[in-house]
Image (tube, helix red, strand yellow):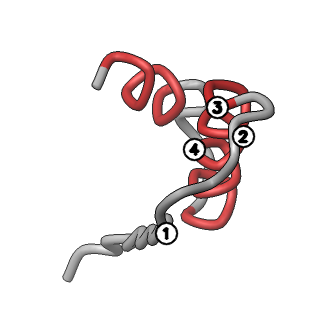
């Protein structure tokens, strides 16, 4: 959870696409060369108000 929050807060002005890129980079850095054994699904929504 801490690593995810760090990745999300790395660029507070980032849009949804950049946020997902930041999360993917953090995941890749964490798993390094480990073989993928499960899927990764991400969804990011941008709330623009009323």
Question: As drawn, which residue projects farthest toward the right?
Answer: 33
Front-most of residues 21 and 46? 21
Is there CB contact under 8 Å for labels 4 and 3?
Answer: no
Which residue in the protein does label 2 denote? 25
Which residue in the protein does label 1 denote? 39
Which residue in the protein does label 3 denote? 31
Question: As drawn, which residue projects farthest toward the bottom?
Answer: 50
In space, the residues marked 3 and 2 are separated at their CA atoms by 10 Å
Against 36, residue 49 (above or below) is below
Among the two numbered marks 3 and 1 on one chain, the one whose residue lies closer to the N terminus: 3
The quarter in which the C terminus is drawn is bottom left
Among the two numbered marks 4 and 1 on one chain, the one whose residue lies closer to the N terminus: 4
Among the two numbered marks 3 and 2 on one chain, the one whose residue lies closer to the N terminus: 2
Front-most of residues 20 and 34? 34
Q: Position of residue 2 (x, y in %)?
A: 33, 16
Front-most of residues 23 and 28? 28
Q: Position of residue 16 (x, y in %)?
A: 55, 64
In space, the residues marked 2 and 4 are separated at their CA atoms by 5 Å
Q: In the figure, is residue 34 to the left or right of 44?
A: right
Q: Disc 2 on helix, strand or loop?
A: helix
3 vs 2, front mark = 3
Q: Position of residue 35 (x, y in %)?
A: 69, 47
Among the two numbered marks 1 and 2 on one chain, the one whose residue lies closer to the N terminus: 2
Q: Residue at x 69, y 36 (%)?
A: 34
In space, the residues marked 3 and 1 are separated at their CA atoms by 13 Å
Front-most of residues 43 and 47? 43
Q: Residues within 10 Å of mark 2 (few under 14, many from 20)?
A: few
Which residue in the protein does label 4 denote? 23
Q: Which mark is residue 28?
A: none
The quarter in which the N terminus is drawn is top left
Q: Residue at x 49, y 69 (%)?
A: 39
């Amino acid at each position: 959870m801490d690593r995810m929050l760090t990745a999300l807060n790395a660029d507070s002005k980032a849009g949804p696409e950049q946020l997902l890129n930041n999360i993917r980079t953090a995941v890749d850095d964490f798993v390094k060369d480990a073989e993928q054994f499960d899927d990764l699904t991400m969804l990011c929504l941008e709330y623009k108000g009323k």
